[in-house]
Every structure is written in structure tokens, then in C-alpha cells.
Image: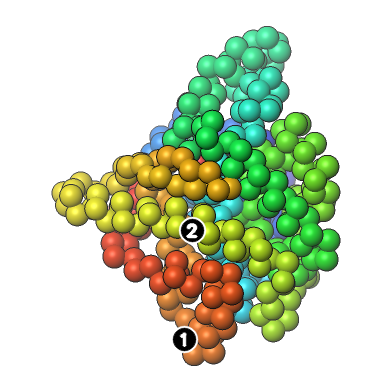
Amino acid sequence: MTPAYKLYGAAISLYTGKARAYLRYRNVPFVEESGSPEIFDRVGFRMIPVLHTPDDELVQDTTVIIDHLEAKLGEPSVYPAGAVQRLIALLFEVYGDEWLVIPAMHYRWAYNLEYILEEFGKTVNPDATVEQQREIGEKISAPFRGSLPFLGIDENTVPGIESDYEALLVRLNEHFASHMYLFGNRPSIGDFGLMGPLYAHNYRDPWSGELMRRLAPNVARWIDLMNTPAPNSGRFLADDEIPETLLPMLEVMFAECMPALLATLDANAAWIEANPDTEEIPWAVGEHEYTIGGKRGKRMLRSYSQWMLQRPLTYYQSLEGEDLQRADRLLREVGGYECMQKEIRRPVTRRNNKLVAE
Ligand SMILES: N[C@@H](CCC(=O)N[C@@H](CS)C(=O)NCC(=O)O)C(=O)O
């Protein structure tokens, strides 16, 4: 029998790794294929992954894919019921999707070049010779390699990107020494967010995978676990507990990643106000100076980051009473209180897979 769902994606794709792990965890029957021009025409642009549902719907964007299936499948949800766990899980998802793409892209193109060029070629033409695949790879990977400066990867930031990433590996390694997933025995939306960059690039690319296994064998083990269909019987830690081992990672997240990503909200608001008659917000809305691993550089402000950031921000800003108090206590401890007060002056939404002002 043909599985009901199709995932249009690729083994080398960062975001496909996130969606695939979710489908496996929820035991959703699916086949994985490459997307076709017809599929991308229907979506409106070329982007993977895309989920093809049994109702012939095409769902684009990993977060939308996961939420679409969460609504269908119900419990056991990947969104913790505990307010603080849920908030931190949403933050880890943004961190994986929008920030760890920086080390993922850096390590892939700096240390795995030969391999990844062939992999790109193999993705397009599995039957071609290695030489042909390399040639195809050179050509079709050009836009990806060319995006490094826009992501803020240059000679000044590379030492910061590497020290920051290696420190993250060591901290995650310590965390996974005593926990299966971020919040106990059930993977959360935060685990899936981390899975994209940590799997497809930093585990699967050979040089990067070797670095991971050497510095952080428990992280490599977590990746194997995330890629395995699960019995779906695990639980999040009781009493909305946040493991101590996550706190140093949250500190780093709030010191460098969140301020940089939050700058997108101001840039988007300025763009929306300057272009009241244009519906779709462009992919990039300016550039800014940012810090990574203590090194300063310039990166493009990607409008889409706001849509991801709105998830933890609106969730946090909806909290009340005891939940808010507990969230604030933790946020103050990790230096995140100020960031989370950020007002969403011009909310954005997705309409027909396009980012627009709400
Ligand atoms: N926010 C999107 C990002 C998807 C994305 O950037 N996918 C990359 C591949 S990992 C892509 O399709 N790039 C354009 C291309 O392959 O032509 C998601 O979560 O699905």
C-alpha cells in the first residue's frame, strides 16, 4: 500500500531533517521524494520540504507541517503542557531554525566541500557519474554558497561561529548525558528545531559529523534517537521542570541570538510602514551588525524570522499569574527578561505561503 503522505525533500536539506524526524516520531506513514516543478508551481516558489497530504493539500514550511499534523494527531503533542517548558521549547525551535543555520552553513562549505558538491549533484541526478555530479553540484549549489555573507559568515565572524558552536555541542552533550530529549523522555518542538541544523549538516556531512562524535557523542546519539520511529509513550519532565543543564545555553541564546533576531521586528515594521500598498514583505529587509561568539559582523535581516519569533513572544506575553511568575524568574536568571518584553508593533502572518503584514 502506498503511504498516504509524501514529503518532498532531500537528504542534504536542513529543514527536511526537521520535518522527517517529526513524521517518524509520530509514526506518520510517508514516502520521501524530490519536489517537481509542478509541485513548486503550486506552492508558489521552490522550497523544501513540502508535505503532500492525502487530501491533496501542499503544506510548506516545517513549522506549518508540524502544526498541521499536531492538529490532526492530537496527543502525545510535541508542545509541552507546562507553560515554562512550552516557552523554552518554542525558543529552541527558533534558535535551531533561524540561528544554528549559521554554523550549519559555515561548517558545510568550509570543511565538507568535495563531499557536498557531489551530494548536491547526486540529489539532482542519482545516475550520473561522480564527475558529472560534481559539475552539477558546482552549478546548483552556487546560490547556497553565495548566501554565506548574507548569513553573517565572514573572516571576522568565523572564529566566533566556531567557538560558539563548539561550546553549544559541549553543553548539549552534558545535557543529553542525563536526559533523552530537551525536557525528558518526549521530544518537544524545540528538539525538532535543533534537529534541522544539527542533523542534515553537522552530523551527516562527514567532517562535521566527526567533530560532533568527538566533542559530543551524546548529541550524535540524540540525533539517532530523533531519527527513529518512537513508541510515543514518553513524558515531559514533571512539574514543568527546566533542567539546569539547559540554562547555560539559554544565557548564550539571550546574549547574542535573540537581540540579533529581534532586530527583524523593527526592520519589518519600518518596511511595512514605508510600503503600505505592497502586500508581500520581501525576503530581506536590510542588514545590521550582530555578534556571534563575541565577534562582530554584518548579516541580512530576514523578514521571515519575525514570524518564527512571534511564536515564543506571543506565547510569553499571553502568560498570567503563577505561570508568568515562573517564566519571569527563569528569564531573569538567564538574562532573557528584557528581550521577551519586546512589543510586536507590526505583527506578520503567512498568507498563501507569503509573509504579509497582519
Ligand atoms: N522556514 C522554512 C525554510 C525552508 C528552507 O529554507 N529550505 C531550503 C532547503 S533546506 C530550500 O528549500 N532552499 C531553496 C532551494 O532548495 O531551492 C521551513 O521551515 O521549511
**Residue placed under numbered mark 1 in the picture:** 320
Quarter containing the C terminus: bottom left
**Across the whole image, how many numbered discs are drawn on residues?**
2
The answer to which of 134 and 26 lies nearer the viewer is 134
- Indicate whether 242 appears above or below 98: below
Residue 210: give x, y in percent of width and height: 80, 36
CA neighbours of label 2 inside 10 A, class few (<14), some (14 to 19), many (20+): many
- The residue positioned 53% from the left and 17% from the top of the image is 139
* Residue drawn where x is 69% and y is 78% of the image: 241
Residue at the spot x=44%, y=54% of the render? Answer: 261
Percent across and percent down for residue 314 are 42, 70
Residue 341 screen position, x and y as percent: 41, 72
Q: Residues within 10 Å of mark 1 (few under 14, many from 20)?
A: few
| 238 with respect to 68 (left or right) | right
Q: Residue type at mark 1: give it.
A: Glu
Decide: is 19 above or below 207.
Answer: below
Q: Is mark 2 within 8 Å of ligand 1?
A: no
Task: Identify which amino acid the numbered label 2 is placed on.
Answer: Met
Q: How is the image coloured?
A: rainbow
Q: CA distance from mark 2 to mark 1?
A: 23 Å
Residue 34, picture quadrant: top right
Label placed on residue 258: 2
Q: Is residue 224 visible?
A: no
In depth, the one of 299 and 143 nearer the eye is: 299
